[in-house]
Amino acid sequence: MRLLVADDETTLLKGIKFNLENEGYEVSTATDGEQALELARSEVFDLILLDVMMPKLDGMEVCRRIREFSTVPIMMLTAKSEDADKLMGFESGADDYLTKPFNILELKARVRALLRRASGTRRETSETLTQGRIMLDLRSRMAQIEGKPVELTAKEYDLLALLMQNPRRVYSRESLMNIVWGYTYAGDPRTVDVHIRRLREKLEENPAKPVYILTKWGVGYYFKG
């Protein structure tokens, strides 16, 4: 199981990482919200633990942004115990909420419970996505068409993975720029059009008449699931 832990308190972060690794988990860490969000975008995790108060982006905002492209279980870690703060965390998309200071045994128990819950509802496609001729391996970040490898750039892969993981959901160019390229990216939204065209050329039998990556005129793009 792969876990991401994000907290700007380095001593606490090291302690959590040490204890979770002793439980057999593979743990990646981040010390600010931007780093946590980038890791969540670029890698596949089974569970994410987010401190609420982090520099650059707070945990609530990171959670909201992750929810735009992933259903990974998220636990918030915070020094605030008020019900209003917990409610805000859940409304941001969190699955659980643990108040500091906490007992490490309770943290481990909560982690196990969230992972059990997630494994019970996780689809068989959690590591691979298949639609028609297209197969996407989320672990290796590889794509295949009818069993043959397809060379995709990093952004082409990220764009395709997002669309395939959320079939029939229409994304505007601006939304795709924020999610795939990062919210700080100040490029031309037409970059999205270029990447969609390249994906169609690589994946569609007839790019001029796509059957997978479709356009919702005046709105954006979506994957026909």
Image: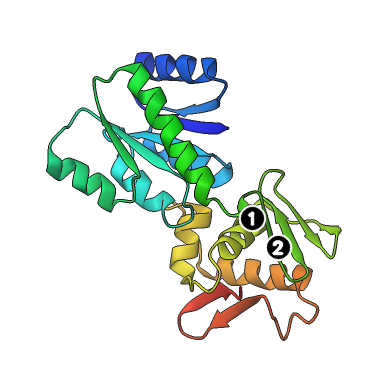
Q: Is residue 4 left or right of residue 157?
A: left
In this rendered view, identify the residue nearer to me: 147 or 198. 147
- Circle 1 residues within 10 Å: few <14, some 14–19, many ≥20: few
Q: Is residue 152 above or below residue 199?
A: above
Q: Is residue 165 above or below residue 53?
A: below
The residue located at (67%, 43%) in the rendering is: 139
Q: Which residue is mark 1?
A: 125
Between 55 and 190, the one nearer to me in the picture = 55
Q: Is residue 191 left or right of residue 6?
A: right
Query: Spatial distance from mark 2 to mark 1, Cα to Cα?
Result: 7 Å
Instruction: Count every numbered label the image shows and give the total.
Output: 2
Q: Which residue is mark 2?
A: 130
143 relative to 158 in the view: left or right:
right
Which residue is located at x 39 percent, y 26 percent?
109
Q: Nearer the viewer, residue 2 or 59?
A: 2
Extreme residue in the right direction: 148
The x, y position of residue 21, in whole percent, is: 53, 19
Q: Report the quarter where the N terminus lies.
A: top right
Which of disc 1 and disc 2 is earlier in sequence? 1
Which colour style is shown?
rainbow
Number of residues whose C-alpha sits closer than 10 Å to that of mark 2, classed few (under 14), some (14–19) or many (20 or more): some
Q: Amino acid at mark 2?
A: Thr
Q: Secondary structure at mark 2?
A: strand
Q: Quadrant of the C terminus?
A: bottom right
Q: Locate residue 217 relative to residue 196 in the image: left or right.
A: left
Callout 1 amino acid:
Thr
User: Residue 16: which quarter of the image?
Assistant: top left
| Residue 168 placement (x, y as % from top left) | 53, 74
Q: At x 45% / y 43%, what residue is drawn?
A: 117
Label 2–label 1 contact, CB within 8 A = yes
